[in-house]
Amino acid sequence: MSSEKHNTSKQTPQPDWRLEIDKYWKQVSEKTGDFFNGHKSMFSAGKVASAVGGTLAVVWLASGFYIVDQGNRGVVTRFGAYSETTMPGPNWHIPVPFENVAIVNVEQQRFIEVGYTDSSRVNKSSMIPQESLMLTADENIIAVRLAVQYQINNARDYLFNVKNNENTLKQLTESVERAVIGRNNMDFVLTEGRSQIVAEIKEQIQAGMDEYKTGISIASVNLQDAQPPEEVQGAFEDAIRAREDKQRLINEAEAYANEVIPKARGAASRIIQEAEAYEAEKIAKAKGETERFDQLLVEYEKSPAITRKRLYLEAKEKLYSSTNKVMLEADQTNPMLYMPMPQTLQQHGANPVGSNEAEPVSEPHTADKNGMRKTSGNELRPSRSKQ
């Protein structure tokens, strides 16, 4: 059964596509010919020419419509001369060859590189010695890599005033960079002067582009790298380490000074205050002594003898109160003295030797007829009997 079906499929002829296409084309041609034969008045030469001309005119006028995207500007030129600048949105201009439109992106951030080329395929930067090597004010050579970011702020000036804006910007950047680097020393460029140098380069580039009326606004200038040539890289690293050590020692010295100086100032202030207090004390004491002397003078003028005697006694009292010696009259015989030792005085809470209070001393005495001793203070004391 299967063999019969297989033989039948082999006997079926394959369709010829060329014959089918020729058949359909012949049918279309016959119908088209019949239509033209039935409407010959409609397809006269004048009417056909008018229809074709009208169609071409409509297509030509429609070609003048264009749309400006957001962030772009359309610069219309009439016979090659500037006509107008159109804003984002649908617009129309006289079609070519009378007017043309150039679309300029004014928001796109563009970059140029001076001193190197950034190859994204190998993910590394290649130095260009002709652009990167520069001479500083102290006659040292350094390699500088600079990147400038800019955008268009005037589409008309960008298209008509300068032929090659990017090449002009790159040459101006290199010229300004060499001038700024040449006015500064190598240490200043490589260390603390980077931000100042970048700001100065940006300002001068913008001034030059404004003078040329290029329609370019400098967004930023980035100093990618600044270092000495590879031949002296090792010596330069040693110099950097020495400079860092110097700065570290300076910082430590300043920290020590900030710690010591306030203490010294505090001590000096304290000494000054003590001296001022001592001065005030002495002055007040001197004034008090002066006032006391003036008052004493008034009393002395009233009764000189009494005042002089009192001053003499006060002076002797003051003098004798500070000594530990005892004075006795030489003409008295066999005096009886009561003079305890200093250790005994300290044990009993008495004043030590040299205190202001005088030690008790027995006065000279004589015996009366009853055997009682008579002192100069009229005190009667029993006499010591002989054993």
Image (cartoon, rainbow, N blue to C red):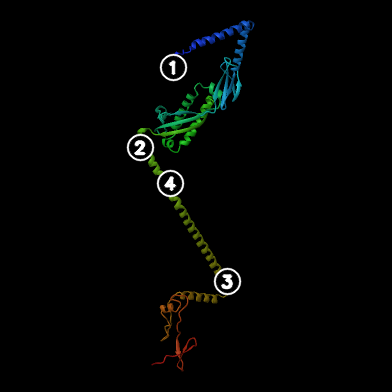
Q: What whole-number distance in Å separates the C-alpha atoms at marks 1 and 2?
A: 98 Å
Q: Which residue is mark 1?
A: 4
Name which residue type carries label 3: Val
Residue 332 image point, x, y percent: 42, 85
The first of marks 4 and 3 along the sequence is: 4
Which of discs 1 and 4 lies nearer the camera? The answer is 1
The first of marks 1 and 2 along the sequence is: 1
Name which residue type carries label 2: Ala
Name which residue type carries label 1: Glu
Question: Can you tell which mark lies on residue 235?
Answer: 2
Q: Residues within 10 Å of mark 2 (few under 14, many from 20)?
A: few
Question: Can you tell which mark lies on residue 93?
Answer: none
Which of discs 4 and 3 lies nearer the camera? The answer is 4
How many numbered marks does the figure carry? 4
Q: Which residue is mark 3?
A: 298
Are circles 1 and 2 on residues that touch, CB within 8 Å? no
Q: Residue at x 57, y 71 (%)?
A: 298
Instruction: In the rendered view, tell whether residue 333 sits above or below residue 64.
Output: below
Are circles 2 and 4 on residues that touch, CB within 8 Å? no
State the SS at label 3: helix
Q: Residue at x 49, y 60 (%)?
A: 274
Name which residue type carries label 4: Asn
Which of discs 3 and 2 lies nearer the camera? The answer is 2
**As rendered, which of 4 and 51 lies closer to the eye?**
4
**As rendered, which of 229 and 71 lies closer to the eye?**
71
State the SS at label 1: helix
Q: Residue at x 42, y 48 (%)?
A: 253
Q: Which residue is mark 4?
A: 251
State the SS at label 4: helix
